[in-house]
Image (tube, rainbow, N blue to C red):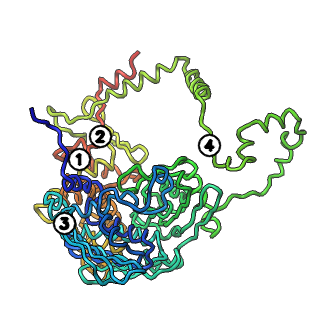
Amino acid sequence: MSNSIHLLPDHIANQIAAGEVIQRPASAVKELLENAVDAGATEIKLIINDAGKALIQVIDNGKGMNPIDAQNAFARHATSKISSIEDLFQIRTMGFRGEALASIAAVAQVSLKTRQANEELGTGVVIENSQVSETSPVACPVGTSISMKNLFFNVPARRNFLKSNSAELKHIIEEFTRVALAFPEIYFSLTNNGQDVFHWEAGSFKQRAIQVLGNSYQTKLVAVGEKTDYLTISGFVGKPETAKKTRSDQYFFVNRRFIKSAYLHHAIANAFEGLIPKENFPSYILYIDVDPAQVDINVHPTKQEIKFEDDKIIYAFVQAAVKHALAQFSIAPSLDFSLDANIQELDAIQKPFSEEQKFSAASSSLYAGFTQKNQAHFIPKVSEAEKKEWKSFFTNIPSGDGNDQNNAESFIVKSSSMGLYKDDTNELSIDKDATLLQINNTYILAPMNAGLIMVHQQLAHERVLYEKYQNATTQAHATQKSLFPVVLELSVADAILLEDIIEDLAVIGYEIEPFGQNSFIIQGIPADVISGNEKNAIELLLEQFKHFSSDIKFSKREKLIRCMARQSAIKAGQSLSQKEMHILIEDLFNCNTPNITATGAPTFIDFKEAYLDGLFSK
């Protein structure tokens, strides 16, 4: 009887582990750059060929390694940064898992040269398939140079999943930029296929921010700085005029580690409320320094998602710090603390504060929050008894017509019976002379045989445009030439992305040409796109495409068509004439699939006459 369970060979186990750590060339770049930072380097150079598929090399002037450490560094779970489980909750370094170099060595051909300052000769190590094939003394400068060639050479299936060179280069630049922003005191350079892309001298946080965002931000950044006994917030937010249609210039760092947090982004968006249009995104580079014990960085393999011990406190501090910074620079209104004379007449001011009232106030949690150290940041947990009191507050409310709350519940149950479908027996159509009603400049009510429909104008137009752009893949869409061509300046990452989809944009009506470094000129736009807004349209399109690109089940053309449909559709809140509403509904009913958008959202809801009668029956 043979055993069915056996141990995997090391090289296969390493390849499996590499799938979590090294997903694409940018993943390896991140790990190698962070190791160079942890080595105490003041200069870090990144060299890549073929978007990292052929070569990724990182050269630093850090402390280097001795011969034994140089070999052990490629073993699984080998690290110099933690020695006990307690260390995991006091992480100050970037790389600490001991998996990066082992994972890289499992999926690439790796060579290492390293030397410490007290050694005359360095150590050279060559590794392939997780096995050290060569170790020898070499002449090299102090520090470490590690190069990995032919990524996924031994895992062809993984290599086939890599995107185009421009797409992979964009991801590499994003990772490079994040590490460089976190450590402005370090010199960084990036060379791609022999050409210099970035050359950032060491400097202050503001100098690095200008290097990354561009010289145009020199006078457009507002400093943020708040220090408490719980955390410190520093960095910069862009003035309202720097807000864009894309999220490209948004960076959060916690203890010098880049993170993604929609929750904290919401805090900043709230601070900018009323200062920028709702569809625009503020620019910011913010650094949060907090006790590592208050943060869990082990909730995601990429370490870009972290968990705070108390998210609400961080949210409140971030929002307050940004609001304060904007108010200091007279960008946002500050609170008016001028005293209203009527306040002096209140009972709370006129009557004496009795001993009984003093005792009652001093025993409250609110009083403790203002008097005890660190209690200003403490949010007490709600007891189960208090939760029950709140529930009883809502459950004992009588209804306005004298009936109990079951009326509301029964209405919700009835409402859920509304059908969303296309009638297969009768053509979907409305009377051409019917008067349509637009509600909240978003929903269109239209009478139909035996009932009515409610159309969501934006979602309906998305479906119409989606099918139109789909048809344009076989027949080029009409283009209207721009009388005054618009010049579009983008970040390096966005410029690479636009170059990658420029041919697909031409099929649906955009005529865009390169115009110098990271610049493009828009010569023409689709015939059904309103002129004068070309720049914002392209920026929004790129932003939507970036957030869509993580879904690999769709082709690049399909993603682009969906983004174009969403971006060009009539927006909710836009007033429409009777003629425009009739045309929209007619176009919708002419679609092959009129009842849902490409993403599955309903475009209209059909209220049958029998259902409406039921709502009003006893």
Q: If you read the primary sequence from the N terminus, does the residue marked by circle 2 or circle 4 appear first?
A: 4
Q: Mark 3 and mark 4: span between their CA atoms?
A: 53 Å
**According to the image, label 3 marks what residue?**
128
Task: Give x and y (percent) for residue 21.
Answer: 30, 57
**For residue 506, side relative to residue 195 (left or right):** left
* 3D distance between C-alphas at marks 1 and 4: 51 Å
The quadrant of the image that shows the N terminus is: top left
Using the image, tell me which numbered label, if any, was put on residue 379.
Answer: 4
Left or right placement of residue 200 versus residue 46 in this view: right
Nearest to viewer (mark 1 / mark 3)? 3
Q: Look at mark 2 in the image and give the residue it sits on.
A: 604
Q: Position of residue 29 (x, y in %)?
A: 31, 68
Residue 343: x %, y % from top left: 82, 47
- Tell me the amino acid under the disc marked 3: Glu
Q: Nearer the viewer, mark 3 or mark 4?
A: 3
What's the distance in space between the residues labelled 1 and 2, CA to CA? 10 Å
Q: Quadrant of residue 486?
A: bottom left
On the question of residue 315 being in view, the answer is yes
| Label 3 packing within 10 angstroms: few (<14), some (14-19), many (20+) | some
Decide which of tag 1 and tag 2 comes sooner along the chain.
1
Mark 1 = which residue? 588
Task: Tell us which disc is closer to us: 3 or 2.
Answer: 3
Disc 3 + disc 2, Cβ < 8 Å? no
Q: Earlier in the sequence, mark 1 or mark 3?
A: 3
Which label sits in the foreground, 2 or 4?
A: 4
Q: Are marks 1 and 2 in contact (CB under 8 Å)?
A: yes
Three-letter code for the amino acid on which mark 2 is drawn = Phe
**Mark found first going from the N terminus, 3 or 4:** 3
Residue appearing at x 23%, y 47% in the figure: 588
* Amino acid type, callout 1: Leu
Q: Specify which label sits upstream in the sequence, 1 or 4.
A: 4
